[in-house]
Amino acid sequence: MLRIEALQTRHLAAIDAEIADGECVAVIGPSGAGKTLFLRAIADLDPNEGRVTLDGRARESLPAPEWRRKICYLPPDSGWWAERVAAHFPDAEAARALFPRLALPEAALDWEVARLSTGERQRLALARALLLRPRALLLDEPTSGLDAASMAAVERVLMEMLAEGGTILLVTHDLAQGKRLAKRCLPFKQGRLESEGTWPRT
Amino acid sequence: MAPDMIPLSYGDLALASLLVLLNAALSFGLRLRLEGQLLIAAVRMVVQLGLVGLVLKALFTTVSPLLTGITALAMVLFAGREVFARQEKRLGGWWTYGLGTASMLMAAMLVTVLALTTQIQPDPWYHPRFAIPILGMILGNTMTGIALGLNTLTTTISRERVAIEARLALGHPWRDAFGNVIREAMRSGLIPIVNAMAATGLVSLPGMMTGQILAGAEPMHAIQYQLLIMFLIAGGTGLGVFMAVLVGAYRLTDSRHRLRLDRLHSSH
């Protein structure tokens, strides 16, 4: 259970939310509504106030790096710090085992980061996060650059994570995807959470 | 004064200064519009050096530890201002000025005092005829190193934001996430002194050594002094750059291992 109480930053009004184990909640709203800031605040990447607990454990009781490995934030633009893909995957064996499930070839490990396509970067960044075996994933537009086949592969992997009791917060502009993965949604507007759970009429 | 030192008359200097006037005339003729700045810079140099001459003369006759200390501190504060002025991005408040000045104070003072008390050993050890020129040379180079190191740190850390935050989000501690940037900043601060050591003697004859030779010193003695100074400069620059870059990096994170770019402001 991921519980968020009165989470606020300079640009985010106090937000309360609860996400159960095995649940995916979609975070929706127009650009600039604070969806990304919300996920970043949960991961403790920006200064913020409020209480966030995972399975009853407050995040302050853990060193920040350990918290972020349990509840991993995946930004919309992936970051890379070495020239080769392999340098970003400490466990090559596990990476090769995971890649096919994300419609990536095992050889992707030997690729150069500079030559990756947007979709490849996105899936490799997701793989990097999944290999940490986080309890919760905070996904920020995880499939915006993917074709239909890769998107389906990614969604299958996310569903498996949910089936195993994982928790997902999913920022998406794709309402159809939101409804496929999530039963409820958190609609944001101008840094506030609007009436919870209402999908906008399409 | 050494026996072979040939003193210059004011007439000699006036004659040499005609070259600057010639430059000004060229600038005017070719419409470079630099003649004003050129003349002002030349006059500033004359006035500043004249004042320094008076200060040094007074210091040398009194040999007071207090006055020497005050002069040294003033030099460090000016150098700190210079480091501050060379930053494209600055830490908020007094941080950039304070950090640059503190790093220099620590590194340059430590190395200077070490050299005076163990290697040169004048009597008394703080004699301004040795302390002030040596501090000046060490400070000038340490200042360049620290200014470059800090500037590289802040500009690179902003440029690499996405990569650094990717690592932080994956649970890497800030020391790992900042590692590449810290190393790059330290390298850029140290490269000038490495290059200077490699080129000394082949490309350039250092000013201090040339000065001593002109003043009639034995070339080998002048070279020994120059080597000592270069080692001191390398040591001081290294210490200063390490301190400035590490503390600067520390200021750009916090106890929750965040990247705190909100503490950086563009200086333009």
Image (cartoon, coloured by chain):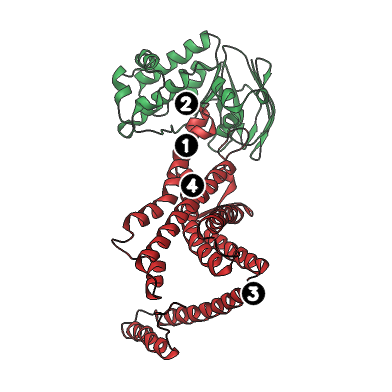
Q: Are marks 3 and 4 on the same chain?
A: yes
3 or 4: tag closer to the N-terminus? 3
Q: In which quarter of the image is residue A49?
A: top right
**Looking at the image, is mark 1 or mark 3 nearer the viewer?**
3
- Colour of chain B, in one word, is red
Residue A81, position as x, y percentages in the image: 41, 34
Question: The disc labelled 3 sits on which kind of residue?
Answer: Thr
B55 relative to B186, above or below: below
Question: The disc labelled 1 sits on which kind of residue?
Answer: Gly
Which residue is identified by label 4? B153
Q: Classify mark 2: helix, strand or loop.
A: loop
Q: Are marks 1 and 4 on the same chain?
A: yes
Nearest the viewer among A168 and B136 is B136
Which residue is identified by label 3? B62
- Colour of chain A, in one word, is green
Q: Classify mark 4: helix, strand or loop.
A: helix
User: Are dots 2 and 4 in contact, CB under 8 Å?
Assistant: no
Read off the chain for label 4.
Answer: B
Nearest the viewer among B112 and B215 is B215
Q: How far apart are marks 1 and 4 (CA)?
A: 11 Å
Q: Classify mark 3: helix, strand or loop.
A: helix
Observer able to see residue B151: no
- Indicate left or right for B18 with A165 as reference: left
How many C-alpha atoms fall within 10 Å of the one at disc 4: few (<14), some, or many (≥20)? many
**Looking at the image, is mark 3 or mark 4 nearer the viewer?**
3
Question: The disc labelled 2 sits on which kind of residue?
Answer: Asp
Read off the chain for label 3.
Answer: B
Read off the chain for label 2.
Answer: A
Which residue is identified by label 1? B179
Q: Do labels 1 and 2 share a chain?
A: no
Question: The disc labelled 4 sits on which kind of residue?
Answer: Leu
Residue A174's disc number: 2
